[in-house]
Image: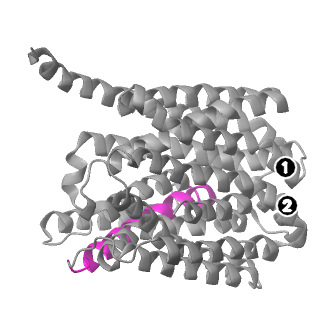
Amino acid sequence: MSACFACIALDNTKLVAALPALARVSGASPILQRWTIEASLLVYASLLLLGGSLSERFGARSVLLLGLCGFAGASVAGACAGSGYWLIAARAASGAATACMTPATLATLKHSFDDRERPTAIAVWTASFGVGAALGPVLAGLLVDHGISAVLLANLPPIALCVWGSLRLVPADLPRHDRPLDFRGASLCLAAAACGLFAILSGPTHGWFSFEVVSSAIVGAGCLALALNWLRRARHPLIDLTLFAQERFAKALLVIFLAYFAFSGVSFVLAQYLQLARGKATLHAGLLSLPLASSLLLGTLIAPRLTLHWRAERALGISLSVAFLGAALVSAASYVQSDLLLCLSLAPFGAGCGSAFATATELVLGSVSQQRAGTAAAVSESAFEFGGVLGVAVLSTLLGSASISETSVAELTPRALGSAALAVLFAWLVALGLSRSVAARATPSECSDP
């Protein structure tokens, strides 16, 4: 399961790292550059809920294998693409495949481990993202001279390993339900997510008050209202809306959204800043980014130890405090243009985010039954991906990516990274409120004990 998640992270991070160098060679416009990254994220985020429902209906292993095969096919199609638009289409297909993979991996963890073992299992699962994120930029630096085909075909060996491991290690008889699929709810949620994300991603290019953006936002809002109305009265809804009435579930999702907004935005801006403003080679920029990914890995592994000493809500607040300190230092490092300070500040930022991701994911999964594990996993991943898409869109807008140049990147990077620090601060405030509400509920029972 961890290898599958690492494979997804490897694909995303190596393409982000390689994009500036590939764009210089191909002469691709900034719009094509952004959509090469964001096409996969848009489709991935839009289809996650359907992927979670499929894993509950047909079994996690079957859906996982389907996603892995689709991921391999999309990678080959992207490597053979003859134009930027075909590459974007292949990346969209890759997003659809990975939308099947991720909920299935998390649902398998929910089914395979009890409440005592699950925090460690989730920490290892989240740590695999750090492994993929660490290897991605370095691998991009080694392959970028061979073009986009080499970068995408590098997905095939780890995909083959994941297929073999899934067939050998994932049980075929994991719990599933016989409820019919909610195609109407899935269609409405898909339309709402796709229109909303298209509006967010098109805003920096077309203008936030352009006809394309405003009309997409209106259609998305209308589809969302219809979806919520349907999900409230459907007999077998795609999403059980009562889950959001649980404070731990809802606030943990908000923390995931805000923290991944910051992390994905920093990752994107960092690749642009190091290569375009500082003139670093792709491999050199990847090596300078290693503290971010390696500390993310360390943070996820530390998370279970934090929850042994403190409640999960308090451990989440501590993790986000460290992440905020790191994000503020990263912004300062980009302002003074110090490589040493940048590497030192990326470590607490990555460690804090990694620990927060693992702890918040455990809070989400610990709030649901095993039968709803696939849906909860999909909702959790949707929070990750919506935060990621919005983080790239907003921070790239602040960076001025529509008319990117070395001067604009150098001047605007501190402002973009400062916005990421504010997102982490908001996540910390949410975690603080969650911790206090849990403490307030615990006080009466503690006082009544003899």
Whether the magenta-drawn stretch holds residue 327 is answered as no
Write the start and end of the magenta stretch as one range. Answer: 179-207
Residue 354 position by quadrant: top right
Horizontal side of 75 relative to 228 (left or right) equals right
Q: What residue type is labelled 2?
A: Ala
Looking at the image, what colour scheme do you see? Answer: one colour
- 445 versus 121 height, above or below: above
Q: Are marks 1 and 2 in contact (CB under 8 Å)?
A: yes
| Residue tagged 2 | 21
Mark 2 surroundings within 10 Å by alpha-carbon count, few (fewer than 14), some (14 through 19), many (20 or more)? many
Q: Nearer the viewer, residue 18 or 107?
A: 107
Image point 43% across, 29% down: which residue? Answer: 315
Separation of marks 1 and 2 at Cα, in angstroms: 8 Å
Q: Which amino acid does label 1 sit on?
A: Gln
User: In this rendering, does residue 382 appear at all?
Assistant: yes
Q: Which of 238 and 213 is in front in this view?
A: 238
Mark linked to residue 275:
1
